[in-house]
């Protein structure tokens, strides 16, 4: 989890309460290095709306997010890479890693296509700064035929 600086000192329970009625927007790549920065190089693949309350009691290491619908329709084509969570008023709270493997948000799908269903099947909070991606992938703008930046 990468918290916006205004919420850096809050507990996980306080963060969950902030998300009541908020949204979780799924993006592909080019995640900003901070949740305080705007998303510039990715289109939203899907927007999921949290219910109120946004989370139920945890189930072991996993959280139990509550959404207003079981599935949401994707709006663009892409492979999910991160999600930005906002309060009901649109204030950015945190960014979460999305995808298969050791990520915070796991979806029932590997990729998104317009109109196809998107469903969260697992959700966990990892410690702040415990991101699985390489730092040189932040704000990367991949283009067909070009590799992502290499570690120097």
Image (cartoon, grey):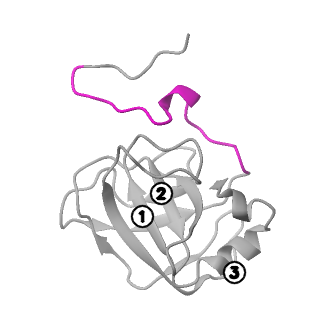
Lower position in the chain sequence, tag 1 or tag 3: 1
Q: Quadrant of residue 120?
A: bottom left
Q: Position of residue 74 (x, y in %)?
A: 26, 64
Asked if labels 2 and 3 touch by Cβ distance under 8 angstroms, the answer is no
Query: Which residue is labeled 3 in the image?
Result: 57
Q: Earlier in the sequence, mark 2 or mark 1?
A: 1
**Residue placed under numbered mark 1 in the picture:** 25
Q: Quadrant of the C terminus?
A: top right
Label 3 vs label 2: CA separation? 21 Å
Q: Is residue 88 above or below residue 144?
A: below
Tell me if 128 is positioned left or right of 146 in this view.
right
Disc 1 from disc 3: Cα separation: 22 Å
Q: Are marks 2 and 1 in contact (CB under 8 Å)?
A: yes
- Which residue occupies 70% across, 44% down? 129
Range covered by the magenta-colored residues? 128-145
| Mark toward the start of the polypeptide (3 vs 2) | 3
Instruction: Check the image and report above or below for 79 versus 120.
Output: above
Magenta span main SS = loop
Q: Is residue 112 magenta?
A: no
Residue at x 65% of width, y 78% of height: 18
Q: Residue at x 18, y 61 (%)?
A: 114
Could you say where residue 122 lies in the image, as x and y percent from the top left? 53, 63
Say which residue appears at 52% left-offset and 26% top-offset.
136
In this picture, residue 150 sits left or right of residue 130: left
Secondary structure under tag 2 reads strand
Q: Which mark is residue 83?
A: 2
């Amino acid at each position: 989890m990468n918290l916006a600086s205004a919420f850096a000192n809050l507990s996980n329970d306080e963060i969950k309460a902030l998300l009541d009625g908020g949204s979780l927007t799924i993006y592909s790549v080019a995640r900003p290095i901070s949740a305080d920065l705007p998303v510039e190089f990715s289109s939203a693949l899907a927007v999921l709306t949290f219910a109120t309350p946004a989370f139920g009691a945890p189930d072991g290491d996993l959280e139990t997010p509550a959404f207003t619908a079981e599935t949401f329709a994707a709006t663009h084509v892409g492979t999910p890479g991160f999600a930005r969570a906002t309060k009901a008023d649109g204030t950015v709270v945190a960014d979460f890693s999305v995808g298969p493997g050791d990520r915070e948000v796991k979806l029932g799908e590997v990729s998104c296509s317009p109109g196809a269903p998107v469903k969260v099947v697992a959700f966990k909070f990892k410690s702040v700064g415990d991101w699985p991606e390489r730092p040189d992938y932040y704000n990367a703008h991949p283009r067909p035929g070009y590799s992502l930046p290499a570690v120097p």
